[in-house]
Each structure stands twice: as structure tokens, then as C-alpha cells.
Amino acid sequence: MFAAIALLFVSAAGIDVSADTYDAANSWWRPGDQRLMPASADYEDALGRIRIVNAGGSFATKDHAFFTPLGTNGRACVSCHQPSNAMGLSVETIRRRWEETGGKDPLFSPVDGSNCPNLPQAVRSSHSLLLDRGLIRVALPWPPQSADGSLIQPEFTIEVIRDPTGCNTDPVYGLNAKKPYISVYRRPRPVANLKYLLELPHGVPPSDFLFYNDKSLLPRNPETGGFATLQLMSDGRDLTPRIQARDAARNHLQSNAPLSDKQLAQIESFETQVYAAQAFDKVGGELTGAGAPPGLGPEALEKGAPARLGNNPINRIFGSFAMWQSPQSSEAGADANRALMFRESAARGADIFYLRRFIINDVGKYNDKGLGNPFKRSCGSGCHNTLLMGMDLAPGYMDLGLNNLPWANERPDLPLFKIVCNSNASPQSYLGRVIYTYDPARALITGKCADVGASMTQQSRGLAARAPYFMNGSAANLRELVDFYDRRFNIGYSEAEKVDLVNFLSVL
Amino acid sequence: MSRDFLMAALLFAAAAALAADPSPGTAVSFLACPVARDTGPDTDLCFFAEHDGHRYALVNPPDWGGPQLKHRVLVEGRVKEGPAICGAIALEGRASVIAEIDASCNVVLPFDGVIKGVAGGVFNSGTQEQRAFAQDLARRAALDPSVSVEPAIANPASAPAPTPPFEHRTLVITYPFDSDRGSGPDMVKLKDVVTFIKVANAKSVQVVGFRASSRLSDGSELIERQQIAEDRAKKIASILSGLGVDERLVHVSWDPHAIDGNGDGDWRNRKVEITVEP
């Protein structure tokens, strides 16, 4: 098996390697494989190579909790957090596993690797959301429960309007079951660069102890007693890697026993020292080293200071791309020219991301958190302002329009819910008290009307290795991601600008 | 009608309009739709609202809450001397977003090339020394992505650590209409109060929440919801507790009766008073 895996391990010092050394088809990390997790490794992806830096140094994965099946269905953490997919999981990888295993891989476990456990598991259609959009079923209790298990009285009722998976109307798994659950379908988030997600913002008081949104206290990290960021999960339900690991072991790995302290420590230790970023582009060439923008590659993430505000247009979120604006090449030939043109395009895309302002309007939990509606910012100075990472620095959620109608892309494959809020509840600021949504998101945790559809912004690194994008996978590729924003905010990007933005995002 | 007469009439009308502008110090209080105005490709939008044939600029202190289209705004202030802001009369006061949706409030004026915003934000504010520091930091940040410009941002600085003798201290936090969201700068002041409570080994902390009514210029009255005084007081108490203040020291109360407004600065009555006895 090891001979078949054509990974090339690159030393921390960096060994010059050629692109054809890598083999995406054989890069799958199977739970329980006894391998070496190297200090640094590159993996081929659709647009080049993703690099994973394991800052703690190489180690054998034998019996390591992150790589070992911990439950009854044969999955491990690594099942959905593959190094070759920037510690996330691409739909391309999922499809390959389906084809290679005839759908028998534990990834396709009925519990959440199918549209609903009640479906015939041998057929593709029962796993269509995973295979087509990379979505894992997330079953959340209704009404919501707080961390101590007590019930939260929701401010709204929820009705299933459309149920293409059948799970929300199922008598065992659905909303009317003896133990009611709501099934929503979400992408696994990458487990890399976590120090940026787990540290509270510096220099943006009082966001070091309060939600920016409503100026209520942030929750406490039960392990340290300090305030927690809520950046880890899209709905903020698990505050720390340890809590998330317990949750995932129980619900995704179907573990019958709680994880031991040693297992939790192993998982936390690994997850908080692994970095992922694109390192090579098939057209643009090497993305790190001399002459490359200083914010690219995982090494920049490893050495960077977390939780800093990149306050565009002065401070560049991913560093300057000026060296690519008028690049010089000592090489000749068509490939070298294409590389130069790609780099110039990516640099223009960086400028658009950093500087091009547009009107941001009607974003629930964003425009109404004090900023004003509308608000005029660029991508970088608006919602993607964390230095080197590109998520929103001040902990907060927003309804960008990914989940709620009328802004969300039409998704007949997803359940559609009707939310009716109590008359005395604060309304969702721009949709009111009757909301149609594919995923109530944060509101399934808090029970608040104003939170319906709101989710935490994601990091923007390693994108090329982990399509599709957005929490419900509604953008199959980076172009669709750019098109969504262009439509949602009526920005009016030209075709050339869209290409530049895609090239920029692809090198992150 | 001669051209000269027409010109004179227009000039008179313009002068009359100017003369009709409310004089500095005039109190206004009204509900209206905010209007957003684009101020150029590199700057943010600004807001104004119209009332009795005049345009009033809507400017709040930092993080107090910007006006929102799709919602009406309660404007309470006094006309301020000085140049127009956003092409409108400057006010000293507050603009509160009304929570319920009003879809008719949805006008964005395009950039007219005349009323321009100021680009650069925090890097154009502060002392010359602060600006030089910020610009140097920005230069370094352009080359090294791990350098942040945060130190240059004019965040409200915490007060110096309190020293004896410790005296009775009061902090008043004001709120937008029907809201319990305090501004960032006020929350920083609250954190300073927590430091004072701990350093001074305070004997008691009184937290009192209030609700209020606003008297509008047309004589009508706008009253906050019944629960808001309690919500405000409890939220402040929870923050104090969360920041480590002994709950036994904190006495929380609220006044369920709305403080009557008189149409002149009624926003000051929407408040929480925190009183510390050392």
C-alpha cells in the first residue's frame, strides 16, 4: 500500500520538487493506516499543490486518535479532514472514494454520509448530497439544547415545507419523532490554521470579551475558563477542538464510549499545529519563497500572529502582491509567459479583494450590528478581515444569503423550512418574522429569530484543494463563489475581474 | 417677467430657504426614513433624514449603531454649528434604528461628485505623531503580512489603573431606542469600572436600568417597550459578573415606568446607571 502512495515528503527546510511527483488519486488517508505524518508534505489538487505543515514535527499515526477509528462505523477524524484536501474534504475525493469502494467506504455511513439513515444505502441517490455537494447530514435536537442539556425555549416555530431527503418528516429521524431532530446538510470545515480561529481578536476592544453583534458576553471555554471565540464551527455549537472532537466522535464516528483524555489531547495537539495553504499553481508556478507574495503558503500561517485585524485598504489581509504586478522572469518560453500572466492576474485579483468597495446591504446580523445598512466595503475590509486567514475577526454571525430566501441559490436538493417568529421576538432585521430557509443555522443553537440563517464566516486558505464552497456547498467552484457575491451584492464585476479574483483565491 | 427679476426672485427664495434653516441649538425629534448617500468609490456611505423640509445628517458616536434602510430612524438632537455633513444640517444627538421593518425606507442616492467622503479612515485622524506612526506601520505591513496596523487604530484606550483614595464612581450608559446593545466605547468604560471595583475592593455596585419615552417635534410620543429597562440592567449585571465581579456586591434593579420626554435630548433617559461605592 505504501508503495502505491506517491506522496513526496518535503523537509521543513524545503526540497525543490517537480509537480509531476504528486498523485492525488492515491493520497487518501484511510482510518487506521499506519503511516508517517510528515513535518511537511505537498499533495496534488485540481489547480496545483496544497502543502500541509505539521509544525510539531513528523510522527507515526499508529494509534493516534486523529487517524484511528474511534467508533463503530470505521471512521476517524481524518475521514473528513484529509491532508490532501487542506484538512477538509473535496467532493472530487468523495466521488473517487465512492467509485473505488463501491460506496462501502465508512465515509458513506448511513448516519450522516447518506441523505437519511432510513434510505436504501447501496444506491447512489441515497448519498446524493455527499456525492454532489460534499454535504454531511447534521442532526440537531429540536428544541435547541444548551451545553448542559437544558432545553432552550425557541422564539419561533419551524415547519418543513419541502423534504427531498425525507429525513425531516421521517417518524424516527424527523421533526415529529419521539426525540425530534432537524436535519441540515453542511460541508466539513478544514481542520487547519486553527490558532487563527481559537484566539480572540487583538486590538478590537471589547471584542475580547463581548460579541460584536449585540455586546453580550462571549461564552467561556470550559477547559481554560477564558472567553471562547465561537469561530470553530459554522453555527458555534462547539467552542473548542476538544468539545468538537467529543461531539464528532459521538455523532459522526458513532462512538459508544467517551474519548479518553489522552485521545482528546492528541486530537487537540495535532489540530492546533497543522497549517494548510496552496503552495504551487499549475500555471503560476511556485507560490512560496523568494519573489512570492509573503502571505502565501502554510509557512506564513505557521509564523504569523493570530487574531490580528487586517484593516484594508492599508493593511493587506494576505500581504502584498506587488511583486507580481510587474513580474520579471529570467526564463523564456510559453510556460514562463503564462506564469507571468497568471501572477499578474492574481495580483489584480488581490487588489480587487482588498480595495474594490461595493454596497453590502440587508445582511442580517451584519448590517444591523451597528455598521449601518447599507455599508460600503471591499471583500477584505468587510467580512474577511482577519490577517492571513480572511474570516471575520470580531466573533459574529451573519446571514449572507446562503441559507435564507430570497438571496440563496435555488436548492431543490435541500430541505426547505418555514420559520415563524413570535410577535414579541426581535425580528430578523431584513426578513422579518416569516423566513424561508434551507438551514436555520445559528438559530438552531440559540433559538433566536434574528439568528435564522446566520453562520460564521470561514477561513479562505487552501481553497483550491477543498471545493465546493460555502457551508451548504452551493458554489461548485471558485467562479461560482465569485458569481454568488456578484449577484448578491450587485457588484458588477467584469469578466476579467472575475477571472482575476478566481486566480487570486486559488493561490491562497 | 424680466430675467433680472427672475434672478432676484430665485436669489430671494434661496436666501429665504437659508434663513429658514433652524438655528444652532434648536432641538428636533422626529421619525423618518433614513436616506443613504454614496460619497465616492473609495469611501463609505453617509446618511441623512428629512423633516419639515430640512435635511439632517445622521451621525452617531462610534459603534452606537448606524442608520439602516428598511427601518425608520428616530432622530433626537440639537442643530450644531458648523459645515453641512452629508449635504445636511449637522446635529448633536443620536439616531436610533426602529426594530420593525419598514420596506418603504429604501433610498440610496448615487455619488453626485460633489458630496465626497474622506478616505483613509483612522489614518487621517489623531495627532501628527499618531499619523506618522500609523503610516510607518502601514508601510511595514505592506511587506510583511504578519504585521497588523491594529496598534495605530484609534480604539478607546482603557483608563489608567485606579489609585487610592478611591471615591464614589458612576458610569451612565445610554442606548438606542428599545435596544440593550451598548456601544463598544461604553463597554470599554464598563471594563474600566470592573477594574475599579476590583482594585478599590468596592463594597457595593448598584445597577439601575431605565426606559424612556421620546417626545417628538409634532407633539406625539414614542414609548419604549415595557421589558427594556429590565433587559438593560440584567445584561450589564451579567457582564459585570462575567468579568469577575462578585455577584453578592451587585444590586440590580430597574424602573418599569418610562421617563417622560420633553423633546430635547430624550435619548439621555434610555440608560443604565452603574454606581460603585468603594
Image: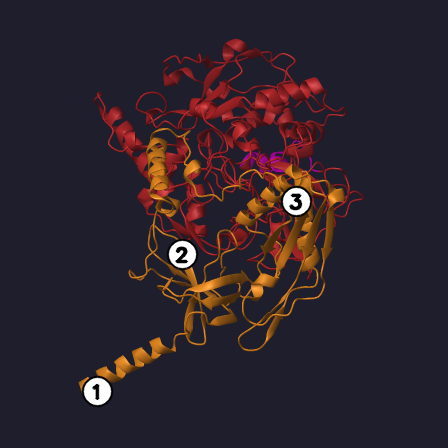
Q: Which image quarter is the N terminus of chain A in?
A: top right
Q: Give the range drawn in magenta.
A: A119-132
Q: Up-down: is A161 above or below A296?
A: below
Rendered hue of chain A is: red
The dot on residue B45 is: 2
Q: How many numbered discs sit on the rendered protein? A: 3
Secondary element under disc 3, as helix, strand or loop, is helix
* Label 1 vs label 2, nearer the camera: 1
Q: Residue at x 37, y 48 (%)?
A: A357
Q: Which image quarter is the C terminus of chain A in?
A: top left
Parent chain of label 3: B
Residue at the extreme front: B165
Residue type of the residue flagged with mark 3: Ile
Residue type of the residue flagged with mark 2: Leu
Q: Tell me where residue A381 appears, x and y as whole percent.
A: 42, 43
Residue type of the residue flagged with mark 1: Phe
Q: Does the magenta stretch include residue A123?
A: yes
First along the sequence among labels 3 and 1: 1
First along the sequence among labels 2 and 3: 2
Secondary element under disc 2, as helix, strand or loop, is strand
Is B198 on the left or on the right of A5, as rendered?
Answer: right
The quarter holding residue A294 reads top left
Report, in whole angstroms, how far the alpha carbon at label 1 lies from the one at label 2: 40 Å
Q: What kind of secondary structure does the magenta stretch mostly adopt?
A: helix
Query: In orange, which chain?
Result: B
Determine if marks 2 and 3 fall on one subunit.
yes
The residue identified by callout 1 is: B5
Q: Tell me where residue A472 appears, x and y as whole percent.
A: 56, 41
Parent chain of label 1: B
The dot on residue B239 is: 3
